[in-house]
Amino acid sequence: MSTGRRHTVVVTRAATQSAGLSERLERVGYHVLEVPVIQIADAQDGGAALDAALARLASYDWLVVTSPNGAARVRDAYASLATDQRPRLAAVGPGTAAALGVPVDVVATDSVGEGLVAAMPPGPGRVLVAQAEAARDVVRDGLSRLGWTVDSVIAYRTVPAVVSPQLLRDAAASDAVVFTSGSTIRAFLAAAGTGGVPPVVVSIGPATSRVAEELGLRVTVTAAVHNLDGVVDAVQSVLPPVED
């Protein structure tokens, strides 16, 4: 016999990415409302700069990826190189590393750009960083300070998705919302306004929380571990699931 209504948590990730987080939340007892406020698109040049960089991938000492989306867009080019031509790999967090589909040399234990920079050895050498259009400069600048010659290339961009008014109303009536990037916050607020934000706001990490605060949104809790499992732990810490 249920002791009460299951809490509803809004997941704002792109539709192609929401499953992993939704499944984790449902597994521990939440009802999930998927409200994909962003979608993943090619860079504005149609991917020309990325293709050009990947064509000379063998000339780099390291390939650095800062998100699963970036990893997905460089994976095939990396795999097509002969083993002795492949640069070493570094990834921001285990989720990004897993998206590469091959062993990764350096994985940041703290899944933020600062964590990756801290995990990298010093230069010299050449590094290619594949990242989002709106990515922070922390990885590029941090690696430059370590003595690396860094080329950064836009692997993809996030653009707002069209969300139905009914879905936004359902989101506003939910118990919590999870934000996994600054782009999801910007898109959600553009669509729903601050009045459409549920009472509990959960952020995946400090960079995302900073965007929320800059936009006037109060974050209830920031995940201590900056990955999907950490997000679920953070939700549970402020909104314990209702037991059946």
Image (cartoon, helix red, strand yellow):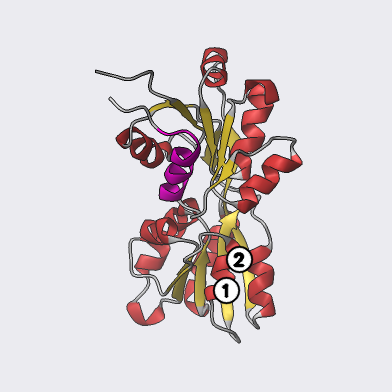
Name the residue nearer the viewer: 35 or 10: 10
- At 65% from the left edge and 83% from the top edge, which residue is drawn? 147
Quadrant of the drawing holding the C terminus:
top left
Q: Is residue 43 magenta?
A: no
Q: Is residue 132 above or below residue 153?
A: above
Q: Which mark is residue 118?
A: 1
The reply to whether dot 2 and dot 1 touch (C-beta < 8 Å) is yes
In this image, 29 relative to 195: left or right? left
Q: Amino acid at mark 2?
A: Glu
Q: Which residue is mark 2?
A: 114
- How many marks the image carries: the answer is 2
As drawn, which residue projects farthest toward the bottom? 124
- Residue 242 visible in the picture: yes
Q: Amino acid at mark 1?
A: Ala
- At 39% from the left edge and 70% from the top edge, which residue is drawn? 104
- Spatial separation of the CA atoms under disc 2 and disc 1: 6 Å
Q: Residue 5's x, y, as percent? A: 38, 18
Q: Which mark is residue 190?
A: none
- At 66% from the left edge and 36% from the top edge, which residue is drawn? 186
Name the residue nearer the viewer: 9 or 99: 9
Query: In terms of secondary structure, what is the magenta stretch mainly?
Result: helix
Q: Mark 2, residues whose alpha carbon is within 10 Å: few (<14), some, or many (≥20)? A: some
Name the residue nearer the viewer: 104 or 74: 104
Q: Secondary structure at mark 2?
A: helix
Q: Residue 225's x, y, as percent? A: 48, 55
Name the residue nearer the viewer: 167 or 243: 243
Q: Residue 125's x, y, as percent? A: 58, 84
- At 40% from the left edge and 79% from the top edge, which residue is drawn? 85
Quadrant of the drawing holding the N terminus:
top left
> Where does the magenta region start and end?
228-240
Q: Mark 1, residues whose alpha carbon is within 10 Å: few (<14), some, or many (≥20)? A: some
